[in-house]
Amino acid sequence: MQSKCHSKLIGNDQLCLKSSHSMFENRMMEKGQKVYDIHLFVCTNQRPAPRTGCGDLGSMDLLTKLKLEISTRNLEKRFRINKSGCLDMCEKGPAMVLYPQDQWFFHVKAEDIPHILDEICS
Ligand code: FES
């Protein structure tokens, strides 16, 4: 049975969305496991003055500390820490969000990192 291709023109290339999605699904099914249990997205967005983004509030240092702490705890295979753009919580920055748990952390400071990881791992 031939499936209908939902396609989209991107530049001069015709991208078959359904075909791409199926290949992704098959790859995941073959592995039979999740790639990571947890993704933590850390906003590192910077904003021009007078507004302040998480990146202006030291979130890159938080990201470095998180990665070090994850490595120290030997959790690299379970956790993925990613930089993100604006999470639309700028007034509560530095902001982080955990997926798939949809758990948010606001006004994060370096000294909060061990407690945050304790909470995530409990
Ligand atoms: S700049 Fe970080 S949430 Fe908007």
Image (cartoon, rainbow, N blue to C red):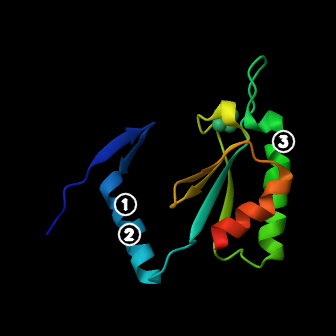
Specify which label sits upstream in the sequence, 2 or 3.
Answer: 2
Q: Are marks 2 and 1 in contact (CB under 8 Å)?
A: yes
Under circle 3, the secondary element is: loop
Q: Residues within 10 Å of mark 1 (few under 14, many from 20)?
A: few
- In this image, 52 relative to 105: left or right? right
The image shows residue 33 at horizontal and vertical percentages of 48, 80
Any mark on residue 21, and which?
A: 1
Of the residues under marks 1 and 3, which one precedes in the sequence? 1
Q: Secondary structure at mark 1?
A: helix
Q: Which residue is mark 3?
A: 58
Q: Nearer the viewer, residue 25 or 105?
A: 105
Q: Nearer the viewer, mark 2 or mark 3?
A: 3
Circle 1: residue type? His
Q: Is residue 78 left or right of residue 109?
A: left
Residue shown at 79% from the left, 55% from the top: 112
Residue 11 appears in the figure: yes
Res 66 visible:
no
Q: Position of residue 113 (x, y in %)?
A: 79, 59
* Mark 3: amino acid: Gly
* Residue 37 figure quarter: bottom right
Separation of residues labelled 2 and 1 (CA atoms): 6 Å
Q: Look at 76% across and 26% down and name the residue there.
A: 52
**Label 2 sits on residue:** 25
